[in-house]
Image: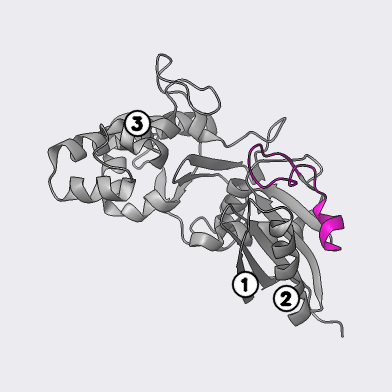
Amino acid sequence: MSAEPIFLGLDLGGTHVKGIAVAADGCVLAEESRPTGDGADGVWRENVRALVATLRGRFPEVARAGLCAPGLAGRDERSIVAMPGRLRGLEGLDWSVELGLPTAVLNDAHAALLGEVWRGAARGQTNVLMLTLGTGVGGAAMVDGRLLRGHLGRAGHVGHLSLNPDGARDIVGTPGSLEDAIGDCTVAARTGGRFSTTRDLVAAAVAGDATAREAWTRAVRALGAALAGLINVLDPKTIVVGGGIAAAGDALFGPLRTALDEFEWRVGASGVAVVPAQLGALAGAFGAARRGQEIFQHP
């Protein structure tokens, strides 16, 4: 009898590349992590190859892989086609050739959603919106069981939703964006330089600092307004919130639910469930493994 297939899930981030070997049911058999080594010619590619070699050395029966990274994935799911400014050499790199293993490639936020649907906070669901709140704001959406990718792979970039047409433009040119309203990247600007991270801002707000509380309330209400609009467009059953800012816990989810009580168009007694992500830093790796498992069975 042949051995059960094993799949690799790889998450190529700006600081670390994470990898897991999983069975077909998602059970984790091994986990590896290495520094990415971005900024030095060829180092990050060598580190990915070394991590994969380590896992394949332990599990020769590895059948397929998935890899997620920042940027826009090609429609053929073999490479990242747009990722300016970071990971030089990533754009256009065919990972099936690079690793000598059939490898599906997808955006990191898309992968995180697939991971949470497969093994995390939205397990088994078919209508899910995910947000990752950190330095910026990323996201992904699944509607009727299909991950939305769009014409160029931009679907799910909810951080670049405009909340104020007269606001300052964000990194992609969107005025008054959700990312600039709540992302870590603008905390100093939003607080007159008093705070540099959301963690510090939230701690001060919880401790009773009036200025911090006002800034944090304004940011969370902006998130609530954005989610109310996205609910009307995508009609999710569940919204999964991950990323470093989600670690604020009740200081985030409490006022966010209050904002949705005010803004959400509700049909029936209860609104859309808003829940914290469960898979943490491995969400992307889980989702990549799942897509690697799926794509070569059902393209």
> Residue 296 has which mark?
none
Q: Position of residue 202 (x, y in %)?
A: 25, 47
Pick whichever of labels 1 and 3 is earlier in the sequence: 1
Where is mark 1, residue-wise?
32
Q: In the rendered image of this protein, does residue 5 appear above or below residue 70? A: below
The kind of residue tagged 1 is: Glu
Q: Secondary structure at mark 3?
A: helix
Q: Secondary structure at mark 1?
A: strand
The kind of residue tagged 2 is: Thr
In the image: residue 39, left or right of residue 191:
right
Pick whichever of labels 2 and 3 is earlier in the sequence: 2
Where is mark 2, residue-wise?
54
Q: Position of residue 191 (x, y in %)?
A: 26, 34
User: Which of the 4 image quadrants contains residue 213?
Assistant: top left
The reply to whether callout 2 and callout 1 are in contact (CB within 8 Å) is yes
Q: Position of residue 60 (x, y in %)?
A: 81, 79
Magenta part of the protein: which range?
A: 80-101
Q: Main secondary structure of the magenta part?
A: loop
Say which of 126 and 134 sits in front.
134
Say which of 71 and 240 sits in front.
71
Q: Position of residue 12 (x, y in %)?
A: 64, 56
Q: Is residue 120 visible?
A: no
- Residue drawn at (30%, 32%) of the image: 190
93 magenta-colored: yes
Q: In the rendered image of this protein, does residue 142 appear above or below residue 295? A: above
- Residue drawn at (27%, 53%) of the image: 250
Where is mark 3, residue-wise?
222
